[in-house]
Amino acid sequence: MECLRKYIDGMLGNVLYMLFRFLIGAMFFMHGAQKLFGWFGAKQAMGFVGLMGFVGTVEFLVGLAVIFGFLTRLAAFGGIVIMASAFIKVHLGINPLATGGELAVMYLAAFLVLTAFGARKWSLDHLLFKKEVF
């Protein structure tokens, strides 16, 4: 019975972590796609030019890498850099709710988790290389 409980706990943990990874990646991908292409309800595409083009490109690529579990730790580190920079440049203050920076803080926390745990079991890295590459 104990063996069955450990198996179910392990399987449920893998499923929930994959769902977490997918949701964080999908939302970050969508933010990048909004900036670059005007998708997902954006009023105007900013394209690949300037700082917002760079940020949109990083968000787009990091989101895809996290969704598929490809170089997840490296991608999450890129997300940390972008979100820390966004918080410092745009939302700096003691109370993130007052400065509009709560989303940057939430993404930063999520990317810290992804950096610590990587892609885990179900990922493109495991499919291609049988282990996490980075």
Image (cartoon, grey):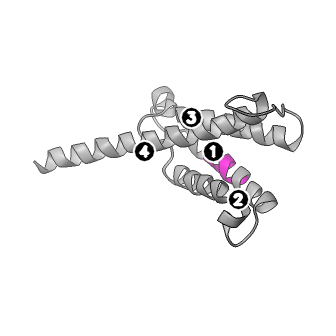
Would you name the residue on which mark 2 appears? 100
Earlier along the polypeptide chain: callout 2 or callout 3?
Answer: 3
Disc 4 residue type? Answer: Tyr
* Residue at image point 53% right, 49% down: 114
**What residue sits 51% from the left and 30% below the top?**
124
CA distance separating discs 1 and 2: 27 Å
Labelled pair 3, 1 in contact (Cβ < 8 Å): no
Query: Residue 18, located in which quarter of the rendered image?
Result: top left
In this picture, is 53 found above or below 81?
above
Callout 3 amino acid: Phe
Q: Tag 2 or tag 1, which sits nearer the N-term? A: 1
Q: Amino acid at mark 2?
A: Gly
Task: Give neighbour class at mark 4: few <14, some 14-19, many 20+ (Cα, 10 Å).
Answer: some
Which of these two is toward me, 17 or 105?
A: 105
Give the residue displayed 86% in from the left and 44% down from the top: 51
Whether residue 121 appears in magenta in the rendering, the answer is no
Q: Tell me where the magenta segment starts and ends, as one range.
A: 74-81
**Label 1 packing within 10 angstroms: few (<14), some (14-19), many (20+):** some
Q: Which residue is label 1 attached to? A: 74
Q: Quick one: 27 or 124, which is closer to the camera?
A: 27
* Residue underneath mark 4: 17
Disc 1 versus disc 2: nearer the observer: 2
Q: Does the residue at mark 1 contact the one at mark 2 (Cβ under 8 Å)? A: no
Left or right of residue 35, residue 120 in this image: left
**Closer to the eye: label 2 or 3:** 2
* Amino acid on which disc 1 is placed: Leu
